Image (tube, rainbow, N blue to C red):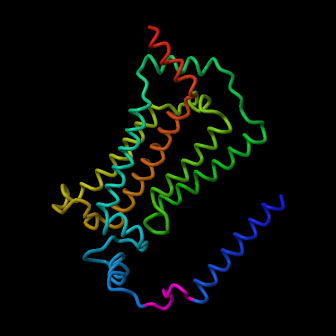
Amino acid sequence: MKRDVIVALSFLIAFLFIAYAVTARNVLGIGGAELRPLGEFYLSHSFAHEGLTSHSPEVVTAIVWNYRGFDTLFETFVFFLAIMGALSVLRLDGEQLKQARELEAAMPHRMMDLIVRATTKLVVIMIVAISASIALHGHLTPGGGFQGGSAMAVAALLLFAAFSKFTLERKGLTLKHTISAYALGLAIILATVLAPVFLYGGKILEINLLPGETGLFNLDVGEYTAVTFGFLTVFLVLGIPEWVFKAVLRRELND
């Protein structure tokens, strides 16, 4: 116990020392530095009324989805490939999945006590509200679809821990539904990315052609949906107990 206290105090002192050195003493030399031309461009054009603008006062979101939008789009595709890779490695066909569900239903499911479950419900409601706010206001305030989706994934993990994966699947949170919702999020992103080409004769990701903040808002909503249900898909697959996988594969080998 004494050792843990010493370690914690050491980290706290180190943090305070570094914070003081960076902010008060300006050891990194970034305080008072002049704004670079690229920074001036972003600040002056992100919420401009015409020209190369994202129609958004949130400069970071404008940079992520507009000025370096291809990079963000490729990151979304990498995330998609990672999820598809996980599903390919751990996939079960229809008959195997049926067997896995039968085995899971037969095993005893232990849930947390009433206090933990009630508290989890309240916390999950708050997380859902906060994550939605982060995503839906990402074009106006700090945040965005990926951040909101990551927060939403935390709510799913809490539900898994407090109620079990099997309980959530009985409520309708199945692999089929999460994959469908994930595909919907990707469809929203692709539709928004390609809309300037077909509607206004522009270029891919030229979302400043779309009216107002429609482009950034749609991209954040699509990213929020894709990240949320992408993580949920992986959680549902990884949530199958190892012994169930082994039992299903052993049956297949014996047959």
Q: Residue furthest left?
A: 201
Image mark count = 0
Relative side of 239 to 75, left or right: right
Q: What secondary structure characterizes most of the magenta part?
A: loop
Return the x and y of residue 229 as percentages of the image width and height: 47, 43
Residue range in magenta is 26-33
Does 85 appear above or below 11?
Answer: above
Identify the residue shown where x is 49% and y is 12%.
251
Residue 59 in magenta stretch: no
Relative side of 172 to 47, left or right: right
Identify the residue shown where x is 37% and y is 69%.
62
Return the x and y of residue 33 as percentages of the image width and height: 45, 90
Out of 37 and 144, give the one closest to the viewer. Answer: 37
Relative side of 205 to 82, left or right: left
Q: Residue furthest top?
A: 255
Q: Residue furthest front?
A: 3
Relative side of 189 to 209, left or right: right
Q: Residue furthest right?
A: 2
Return the x and y of residue 139 as percentages of the image width and height: 43, 66
Q: Quadrant of residue 3?
A: bottom right
Identify the residue shown where x is 58% and y is 83%.
22
Quarter of the figure that contains the C terminus: top left
Identify the residue shown where x is 51% and y is 56%.
148
Quarter of the figure that contains the N terminus: bottom right
Return the x and y of residue 52 as percentages of the image width and height: 26, 74
